[in-house]
Image (tube, rainbow, N blue to C red):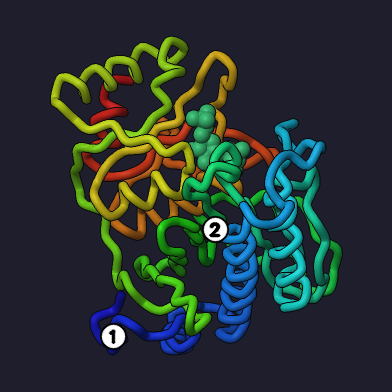
Amino acid sequence: MEASRIALPIGTALDRFIKNNQDQFQYASGELSQLLRDIALASKVVNREVNKAGLIDIMGPMGSQNSGGEQQQKLDVLANIRFTRALTKGGEACALISEETESFVDLNNDGNYVIAIDPLDGSSNIDVNVSIGTIFSIYRRKSPVGQPIQDQDILQTGDEQVAAGYILYGSSTMLVYTTGHGVNGFTYESTLGEYVLSHPDMTIPADGRIYSVNEGLSNSFSESVKTYLTYCKDNNYTARYIGSLVADFHRNLLKGGIYIYPATAKDKMGKLRLMYECNALAFLAEQAGGRATDGKNRILEIKPKDLHQRTPFFVGSTKMVEKAESFG
Ligand code: AHM
Ligand code: MG
């Protein structure tokens, strides 16, 4: 954050923090505040539903498939409804790209922003009380306001994000976001119903000793990834893999580490989606001083050709990601 800015103390409510930092945003200041508020509000509803998951009939498969042909869980679908509704009502968003819908959803043609979202990531952990997350990216539309949305509005590169963040539904619920001026984390205080600043100016350690990868798939990794994993073991690194991207990323952000989802025999381009999983986390990682690539290229420079495009993903402490790339 800029040196001249008065640092707000820990415990500051999200709304107040957003208002205090509005001038860092190069477009109409109230718009971004409104968008972040809409996302925060929807996340509180999702948080309530995630917390009640064992008590009411919202667990288990929906019986339908998402854009990638994967089984949708009831909570995936519910979360998608909550975020879509909040962003529709807020009025600032013109289109929504979601893991749960095949093509983008038209919202308000007068809105200036395109939102890419994975409403509830970590599907395999939804029903088993393990941390899950929401990931979002915010882009400024390119075509004139009032016109129908065009491809140039939707298929923007990660470098064009104006804000991005995630919500982690974990042992506590956190919202972490950036507008390109550092990364700040807020913890949900349920008795107040507010996100409050708990992790100001987050930075990721330049190096670390934690590696996070689904090693069960390692037979089909490239030789370079296999060699890096051998290097991790030879150096007594610690393996930590939750299988929820937000939770794995968040831990590595705090402690230092690397998360890898490489190409596999099943998923030749990796499993994760560029537009609503990797771009937001790559933006946050870089803003926190870390690195995010597909093993060679910066994630934020990859030009998307498709809403649901996948990419291999290497993200975390700069030195660890560079080391992993060096075997390639
Ligand atoms: P999802 O969008 O279906 O939830 O899949 C994304 C998740 C990530 O959260 C996680 O890091 C990864 O898939 C785990 O995949 P795997 O079970 O193959 O290790
Ligand atoms: Mg996902």
Which residue is at a point 43% across and 19% down the rendered structure image? 216
Query: Considering the image in quadrants, where does the C terminus appear?
Result: top left
Decide if residue 303 is in sight here: no
Whole-percent x, y for residue 327 in the image: 28, 20
Residue 51 picture location, percent across and down: 57, 60
**Mark 2 and 1 residues: CB-CB less than 8 Å, in contact?**
no
The kind of residue tagged 2 is Glu
Which residue occupies 45% across, 72% down?
188
Give left or right: position of 145 versus 169: right
Residue at image location 39% in from the left, 30% down from the top: 213
Label 2 sits on residue: 160
> Which residue matches tag 1?
9
Residue 27 is tagged as: none
Residue at the far front in the pictured view: 55
**Is residue 110 shown left or right of residue 28?**
right
Q: Nearer the viewer, residue 49 or 221?
A: 49
Image vertical order of residue 315 relative to residue 96, above or below: above
89 left or right of 206 in image: right
CA separation in Å, label 2 and label 1: 30 Å
First in sequence, mark 2 or 1: give its number: 1
| Above or below 195: residue 143 | above
Alpha-carbon neighbours of circle 1 within 10 Å: few (<14), some, or many (≥20)? few
Closest to the camera, between mark 2 and mark 1, is 1
Res 289 quadrant in image: bottom left
Of the pair 309 and 187, the residue shown nearer to us:
187
Residue that appears at 45% across and 88% down? 16
User: Please, is residue 59 above or below residue 23 in the view?
Assistant: above
Amino acid type shown at disc 1: Pro
Where 217 sits versus 163, above or below?
above
Q: What percent of the width, then of the height, locates residue 240? A: 32, 36
Seen from the viewer's position, the closer of residues 18 and 70 is 70
- Using the rendered image of the protein, determine whether residue 51 is visible from the camera's viewpoint: yes
